[in-house]
């Protein structure tokens, strides 16, 4: 197993803030009291190992995940870049502000660092942006962004009043979900807007893929590390694997030491071909 590098590399958001390229997902945490202590320990270990970007959402566990994250951050809040998301059904001007205040209470903090629109709903983007800006002015969020927007939605968002303040688009991205490489990823890279790759190990489903297993063996690594190294290979991407098992947290952290070769990438292209034309954005 590779030994961890000394610090997690960072990437600059458009507003100038540096965030780690490897963070911590939380979907599914906080839903079973018997797993609470283990989940808190996993998040705290991840933060202590430098994966200090924590991603959550009001949707997860109907708020119970944010509650667990708040407990995990006690004594560590100032080390963490905290990301949460507003549901599209709450994304009106007043609804966004009320949802954020509920999230802040559950997260036991006075501010969220990056607040995302979880996916596009029926509220015009401009209304949500107005609410985001009010929340920034009140010090309740520091920055804001979007999730699950395809290239057309993204262009529309950027053209909305104030839309260029967007800091990221959080989307599904892993070796088996490469559609964004055709259009969304280059479009955002050109604007220096990083994407945040969710489900970067496809919720575990790609870990038995023979090619990933073979590549992992060549590096003395694991298939999860290969998937993460693949997501991070070209820059402009922040990966947020979720791990409730401390061994998985350590494994993911050490993915930063895995450098894929041209041969590895060619092997991945053979089993998971890069897109040759636009594909509809996939969501989980
Ligand atoms: N914006 C959106 O719409 C959206 C959608 C989906 C996800 N997300 C965010 O992205 C985060 C990550 O995505 P995800 O949770 O869907 O899937 P994921 O991170 O691809 O996979 C999580 C699963 O992989 C396992 N795992 C983690 N590290 C591993 C390792 N090194 N070896 C083997 N198994 C490992 C975890 O097990 P253990 O938990 O047992 O360790 C868990 O079952 C979410 O938690 C959430 O914060 C956002």
Image (spheres, rainbow, N blue to C red):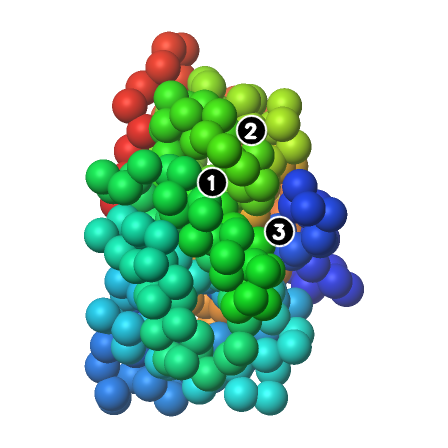
Considering the numbered disc 3 on the image, is that residue within a helix, a strand or a loop? loop
Looking at the image, which residue is at 58% across and 67% down?
139
Q: Residue furthest right?
A: 6
Q: Is mark 2 within 8 Å of ligand 1?
A: no
Q: Is 83 drawn above or below residue 163 in the view shown?
A: below
- Residue 279: image x %, image y %? 31, 19
> Mark 2 or mark 1, which has the lower sequence index?
1
C-alpha distance separating marks 3 and 2: 16 Å
Q: Which mark is first along the chain, 3 or 1? A: 3
Disc 1 under 8 Å from ligand 1? The reply is: no
In this image, 261 relative to 41: left or right? Answer: right
Which residue is situated farthest in the top direction here? 277
Q: Does the residue at mark 1 contact the one at mark 3 (Cβ under 8 Å)?
A: no
| Picture layout, residue 256 above or below residue 102 | above
- The one of 188 and 36 positioned closer to us in this rendering: 188
Task: State which quarter of the image contains the C terminus.
Answer: top left
Task: Tell me the CA gap for discs 1 and 3.
Answer: 14 Å
Q: Give the SS element for disc 1.
A: strand
Of helix, strand and loop, which one carries label 2? helix
Gap between marks 2 and 1 measured at Cα:
9 Å
Disc 2 marks which residue?
Answer: 188
Q: Which residue is mark 3?
A: 21
Question: Mark 2 near mark 1, Cβ–Cβ under 8 Å?
Answer: yes
Q: Is mark 3 within 8 Å of ligand 1?
A: no
Q: Residues within 10 Å of mark 3 (few under 14, many from 20)?
A: many
The residue located at (41%, 25%) in the rendering is 156
* Residue at x 54%, y 22% (from the top left corner): 187
Name which residue lies at 65% across and 77% down: 78
Point out residue 146 in the picture as x, y percentages from the top left corner: 43, 44
Please identify the quadrant where the N terminus is shown: bottom right
Seen in the picture, residue 58 relative to 279 is either above or below; the reply is: below
Residue of label 1: 169
């Amino acid at each position: 197993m590779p030994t961890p590098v000394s610090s997690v590399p960072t990437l600059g958001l458009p507003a100038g803030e540096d965030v780690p390229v490897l963070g911590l997902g939380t979907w599914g945490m906080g839903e079973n009291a018997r797993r609470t202590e283990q989940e808190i320990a996993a998040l705290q270990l991840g933060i202590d190992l430098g994966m200090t970007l924590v991603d959550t959402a009001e949707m997860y566990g109907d708020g119970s995940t944010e509650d667990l994250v708040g407990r995990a951050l006690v004594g560590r809040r100032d080390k963490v870049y905290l990301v949460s998301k507003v549901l599209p059904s709450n994304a009106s001007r007043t609804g966004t502000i009320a949802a954020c205040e509920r999230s802040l209470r559950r997260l036991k903090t006075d501010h969220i660092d990056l607040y995302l629109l979880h996916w596009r709903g029926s509220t015009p983007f401009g209304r949500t942006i107005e609410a985001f800006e009010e929340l920034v002015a009140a010090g309740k969020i520091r920055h804001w962004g979007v999730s699950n927007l395809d290239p057309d939605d993204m262009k529309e968002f950027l053209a909305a009043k104030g839309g260029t303040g967007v800091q990221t688009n959080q989307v599904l991205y892993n070796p088996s979900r490469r559609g964004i490489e055709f259009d969304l990823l280059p479009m955002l890279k050109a604007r220096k807007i990083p994407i945040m790759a969710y489900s970067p190990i496809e919720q575990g489903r790609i870990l038995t893929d023979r090619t990933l297993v073979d590549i992992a063996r060549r590096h003395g690594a694991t298939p999860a590390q290969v998937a993460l190294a693949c997501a991070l290979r070209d820059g402009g991407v922040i990966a947020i694997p979720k791990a409730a098992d401390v061994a998985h947290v350590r494994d993911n952290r050490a993915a930063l030491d895995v450098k894929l070769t041209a041969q590895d990438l060619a092997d991945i292209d053979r089993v998971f071909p890069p897109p040759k034309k636009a594909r509809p954005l996939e969501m989980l």
